[in-house]
Image (spheres, helix red, strand yellow):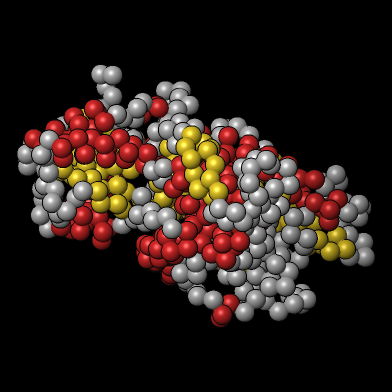
Amino acid sequence: MQRQSREHFDASTIPDDLAPIATVLSKMLPGDWRSLRPVIDRRKCVQCGLCWLYCPVQCVTAKPRWFAFDLKVCKGCGVCAQECPQRAIRMIEEAG
Amino acid sequence: MSVAATAERPTANTPRSVVVEGNEAAAIGVGLARPDVVAVYPITPQSTLVEHLSQMIADGRLNASLMNVEGEHAVLNGLQGVALAGGRTFTATCGPGIAYMFEPYVRTPGLRLPMVASLVTRDLLSPQCVWGGQQDAMVVREAGWIQMHCETVQEILDTTVMAYKIAEHRDVMLPVNVCHDGNYLSFGVTRVELPEQQEVDAFLGPPATNWHIALDPERPMGVDPLTGGAGGPGPRNFVRYRKGQCHGMQNALRVISEVHAQWAERFGRNHAPLIEEYRLDDADCALVTIGSMTGAAKDAVDIARDQGEAVGLIKVKTFRPFPLEVMTAALAKVTRVGVVDRSVSFGWNAGPVYQETLGALYHTGTPIPAVSFIGGLAGADITAEHFARAIALTREAKWGSVAAEPIWLNEND
């Protein structure tokens, strides 16, 4: 988790039944509730970077010869598979 | 910054009065409260109220930003941002405008943002209608906003200033609608006394809108995170916030009374904060009214009194939160009650204020005959004659003879 530049607001100074605010980060990541995962065909990937541009949760990482996905962060939306001009990405169901 | 109604009127800090319409009185009250941002959309519909405000800003008489956005939905979302950043806000709306505003409108009380907005009450569509009625206010009565209904033009000005003090009170922290009747008050022209700016500054103090929830890089926090879902702490947290909101509303009953008392002490004008009892103490029969209709109703009560009838009146000023305790005490004084609504409850085939009066009557422990009257829809005038008829029918009302229909006062006008 990236370090915050500043401590979160100290909510202990205000009533806890007033306005709904959050002062600690949720431990849950998008990958915890994903139902589809992207699988890349390394032979087709030309490293154009379109998936990296489009990914709404910025889970795409560059490998030496292809692009990969951080599956802790990927929420399985499938935008990358939809946009890949090489059809190098397909979405498969998470098993179990 | 002076907020004299026009440039050639007397300067600030001299006691003075002006002759203005209700919308201008509201605008003067807003100006005295020195909002940081006024957000408006010119029509869905809008009233002359924000025209007066935009003129005051353009003339340099009010040092505020005028945010002209693309609709009422954006008006209130924008103002939520202003309040979260610590600014004092204002907007005015009515009828279809508040319908368009509904999504951010219901969110504002839960965020506990102490915003003030005029609701120039108007009948809702359809039939197509641009005239007065209180259907808009009654539709949003469970949205969580405080609702205070004014009787006179002077009361609009005074209540608008007081609304900021009530909303920003630490025990309240809720948005306030200052309601005044479309046509009858909005365009009704009377003489009003103007409070002095420095007195209002001392009365209100600086804005306090975001000490508890903020968009502020110095105090990083998540605003309004998802709160709910079975199996986790969400529903428990949700209940805690909901209870807090309900407590804020109940606290408002005390704060509204305190602020009205402080206003009377500083400015010499006494407005009934929750309800007003008029000639009620020895009455056996009472009318319940809300808003500007009350003037004509008081005339009808006076006429009936001259004829020896023991009639009184209960005016509801604060409708949200509902002033259950004082309403119950007032109703306990009489043996018959007639409630005059300027709107309709479709579910109950009666008036909304009537329904709520019945709720208060339960707490008196003594069931008494109660009659629902509906009048003044679509700009119709409820005259002293209409109220005389309401009084006569209320006096005849017998327990158990529950009418299948409310009595529509303007039906045969």
Q: Would you say B82 lies left or right of B404 here? A: right
Q: Pick whichever, B265 or B92, lies toward us.
A: B265
Can the viewer see residue B213 in this picture?
Answer: no
| Picture coordinates of residue A36, whole percent (x, y) | 65, 56
For the N terminus of chain B, the image quarter is bottom right
Residue at the top extreme of this rendering: B412
Q: Pick whichever, A57 or B362, lies toward us.
A: B362
| Picture coordinates of residue A43, whole percent (x, y) | 88, 55
Q: Quadrant of residue B133?
A: top left
Name the residue rendered at 61%, 56% in the picture.
Answer: B13
Q: Quadrant of residue B51?
A: top right
* A24 is higher (above) or lower (below) than A75: below
Can the viewer see residue B21 in this picture?
Answer: yes
* B185 is higher (above) or lower (below) than B361: above
Name the residue rendered at 10%, 39% in the picture.
Answer: B308
For the C terminus of chain B, the image quarter is top left
| Picture coordinates of residue B335, whole percent (x, y) | 10, 48
Q: Pick whichever, B385 or B207, lies toward us.
A: B385
| Picture coordinates of residue A2, whole percent (x, y) | 76, 74
Name the residue rendered at 68%, 49% in the picture.
Answer: B62
